[in-house]
């Protein structure tokens, strides 16, 4: 196997962090570089067992800092880039959109310039199904790769903008790129502001769990490990210039998710607290992942299996999330 240098941006975050571990374990002859600014969601304790490996390297840097990023690319001559780094919490984007534009749009453009400059062999841009906007509750409707982008929050608008930039660098400069758009991820090392770890942590302390509106907003849930295997396939076999949707075929509304966790932990539904709905809260996301499945990928976790494993992980790893 040829030794490659893979740059993973945002590898101190949730999905990027799981992908770093996945790649190091699967490809011991790849050199894995983790570039992260270590914002409030960035955490390196998850790498306690990796820091001594000779194929893992950490670089603290801001992807929007051209004076740092370009020399790094010139020095290391990365073969491939898998780009996770982004501001991603919708509520925070409603409060402060500017930081989302800087990181998600300008930061992506800086990385694209650097990748073009050294001639990387693949640039995988990890995006979100939220760029498509919302679906109604008709179970026969799904997002496909041909669905027009109609983002409804500052976060999803910034991600859609970065998607367009990635596409433009392929069409204009011939940069070998893929864009992936995933549904809601869950699993180990997810920051406790997100629905599933927030619910678990609050339930364990018998605290109220806030649920927006009536809790009927539907999401397609995918275990982070399944997302990692999808990205691995796209990185190695994705057709240049193509978009691939990554979905778990596990639709649940928010209230169902919360009640599943309550039942598993043996807690009372009295801990559910309905709160004022989020501004511009999309009703439903659902992905048709058939294109990626035809490439050879398939999700392995059902929601029931994945959520049980995730709850068990949080029960056993309070050392990680307890102080967050």
Image (cartoon, helix red, strand yellow):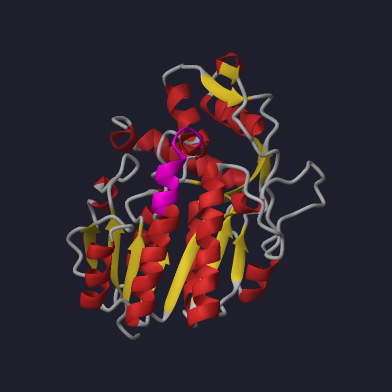
Q: Which residues are magenta?
A: 94-103
Residue 96 shown in magenta: yes
Q: For the C terminus, which image quadrant? A: top left
Would you say 162 lies left or right of 50 here?
Answer: right
Residue farthest to the top, as pictured: 270
Q: Nearer the viewer, residue 78 or 290?
A: 78
Q: Main secondary structure of the magenta part?
A: helix
Would you say 229 lies left or right of 254 here?
Answer: left
Would you say 192 lies left or right of 135 here?
Answer: left
Residue 302 coordinates in the image, percent (x, y): 62, 50
Which residue does the image show at 63% across and 69% down from the upper left?
292
Residue 73, quarter of picture:
bottom left
Q: For the N terminus, which image quadrant? A: bottom left
Q: Nearer the viewer, residue 230 or 65?
A: 65
Which residue does the image show at 27% across and 70% down from the upper left?
70
Residue 202 shown in magenta: no
Which residue does the image show at 78% across and 43% down from the upper left?
136
Would you say 161 lies left or right of 188 here?
Answer: right
Residue 138 coordinates in the image, percent (x, y): 82, 45
């Amino acid at each position: 196997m040829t030794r490659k240098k893979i740059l993973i941006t945002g590898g101190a975050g949730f999905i990027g962090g799981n992908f770093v571990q996945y790649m190091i374990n699967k490809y011991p002859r790849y050199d894995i570089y983790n570039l992260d600014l270590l914002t409030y969601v960035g955490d390196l304790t998850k790498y306690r067992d990796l820091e001594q490996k000779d194929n893992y390297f950490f670089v603290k840097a801001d992807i929007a800092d051209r004076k740092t990023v370009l020399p790094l690319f010139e020095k290391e001559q990365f073969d491939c880039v898998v780009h996770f780094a982004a501001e991603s919490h919708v509520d925070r984007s409603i409060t402060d959109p500017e930081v989302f534009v800087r990181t998600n749009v300008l930061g992506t453009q800086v990385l694209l310039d650097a990748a073009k400059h050294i001639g990387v062999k693949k640039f995988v841009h990890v995006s979100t199904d939220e760029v498509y906007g919302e679906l109604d509750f008709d179970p026969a409707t799904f997002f496909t790769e041909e669905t027009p982008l109609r983002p409804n929050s500052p976060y999803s608008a910034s991600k859609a903008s970065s998607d367009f930039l990635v596409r433009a660098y392929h069409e204009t400069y011939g940069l070998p790129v893929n864009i992936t758009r995933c549904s809601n991820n869950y699993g180990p090392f997810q920051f406790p502001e997100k629905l599933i770890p927030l619910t678990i942590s609050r339930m364990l302390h018998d605290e109220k769990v806030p649920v927006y509106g009536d809790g009927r907003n539907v999401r397609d849930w995918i275990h982070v490990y399944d997302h990692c295997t999808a990205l691995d396939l796209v990185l190695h076999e994705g057709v240049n210039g193509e978009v691939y949707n990554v979905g778990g075929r596990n639709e649940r509304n928010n209230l169902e998710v919360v009640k599943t966790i309550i039942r598993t932990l043996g807690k009372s539904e009295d801990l559910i607290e309905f709160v004022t709905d989020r501004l511009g809260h999309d009703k439903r996301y659902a992905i048709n992942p058939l294109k990626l499945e035809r490439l050879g990928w398939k999700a392995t976790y059902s929601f029931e299996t994945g959520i049980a494993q995730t709850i068990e992980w949080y029960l056993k790893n309070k050392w990680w999330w307890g102080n967050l």
